[in-house]
Image (cartoon, rainbow, N blue to C red):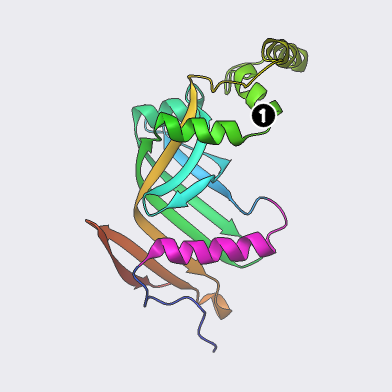
């Protein structure tokens, strides 16, 4: 049996994630940065949805949302989350668990300014996760915000910003023959990481 390419020799999970993300960007036809985000509500009920990774470095993994949305409210109340990347074409996945922090305002401003103008307008028009009486009502709000910000820059809404998942555990999974997959877990220990293999 051929040994999978994944090994536990490296001590930097972010460098490994970067290599896997580059491979996903080359092979995945749609949204290689899509990830499942799991949060927990005040009642202890878990909730999961797909979001897009917008940045990552040694500090963590960043995504943006409406803080008044269901996930935003849950993360503000219980700042812990799990992420899952599944790259079907590559037969790989990455699981991340950690604490959550809000990104600084200047970082959120910079990202918001890089978004297409219509996406900026949408951030103002959408009361994310709340009941919508009709599609027409949403279109009216978009039209109103488009008129309001017809000239000049669109400012970032005060309720729209980013979260950073600061990982405490990162697991890399790679498919193996006969279900003998390779699983390597990185555990944070202060400023460094330890690794261990797991049975498939």
- The number of discs equals 1
Q: Nearer the viewer, residue 88 or 141?
A: 141
Boundaries of the magenta span: 12-30
Visible residue check, residue 41: no
Q: Position of residue 137 (x, y in %)?
A: 73, 11
Identify the residue at the far front of this view.
152
Q: Nearer the viewer, residue 114 or 135?
A: 114
Visible residue check, residue 54: yes
Please say whether residue 118 is one of the residues in the magenta stretch. no
Identify the residue at the far right of this view.
136
Residue 192 horizontal side relative to residue 74, left or right: left
Q: Residue at x 42, y 60 (%)?
A: 14
Instruction: In the rendered view, tell whether residue 56 sits above or below residue 19.
Output: above
Q: Position of residue 36 (x, y in %)?
A: 53, 46
Please say whether residue 16 is one of the residues in the magenta stretch. yes
Q: Nearer the viewer, residue 23 or 129?
A: 23
Structural crowding at the residue carrying mark 1, measured as other residues with C-alpha within 10 Å and reported as few (<14), some (14–19) or many (≥20) = few
Secondary structure of the residue carrying numbered label 1? helix
Q: Position of residue 69 (x, y in %)?
A: 51, 24
Residue 101 horizontal side relative to residue 200, left or right: left
Q: Residue at x 61, y 66 (%)?
A: 23
Q: Which residue is mark 1?
A: 119
Q: Residue at x 61, y 18 (%)?
A: 124
């Amino acid at each position: 049996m051929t040994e999978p390419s994944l090994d536990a020799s490296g001590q930097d999970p972010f460098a490994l994630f970067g290599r896997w993300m580059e491979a996903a960007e080359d092979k995945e036809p749609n949204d290689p940065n899509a990830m499942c985000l799991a949060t927990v509500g005040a009642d202890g009920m878990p909730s999961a949805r797909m979001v897009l990774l917008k940045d990552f470095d040694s500090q963590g993994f960043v995504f943006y949302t409406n803080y008044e949305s269901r996930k935003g409210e849950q993360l503000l109340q219980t700042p812990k989350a799990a992420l899952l990347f599944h790259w079907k074409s590559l037969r790989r996945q990455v699981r991340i668990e950690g604490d959550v922090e809000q990104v600084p305002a200047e970082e959120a401003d910079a990202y918001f300014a890089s978004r297409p103008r219509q996406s900026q307008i949408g951030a103002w028009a959408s009361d994310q996760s709340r009941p919508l009486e009709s599609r027409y009502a949403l279109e009216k709000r978009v039209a109103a915000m488009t008129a309001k910000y017809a000239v000049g820059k669109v400012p970032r809404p005060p309720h729209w910003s980013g979260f950073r998942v600061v990982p405490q555990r990162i697991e890399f999974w790679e498919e193996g023959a006969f279900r003998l997959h390779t699983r390597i877990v990185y555990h944070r220990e202060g400023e460094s990481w330890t690794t261990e293999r797991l049975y498939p």
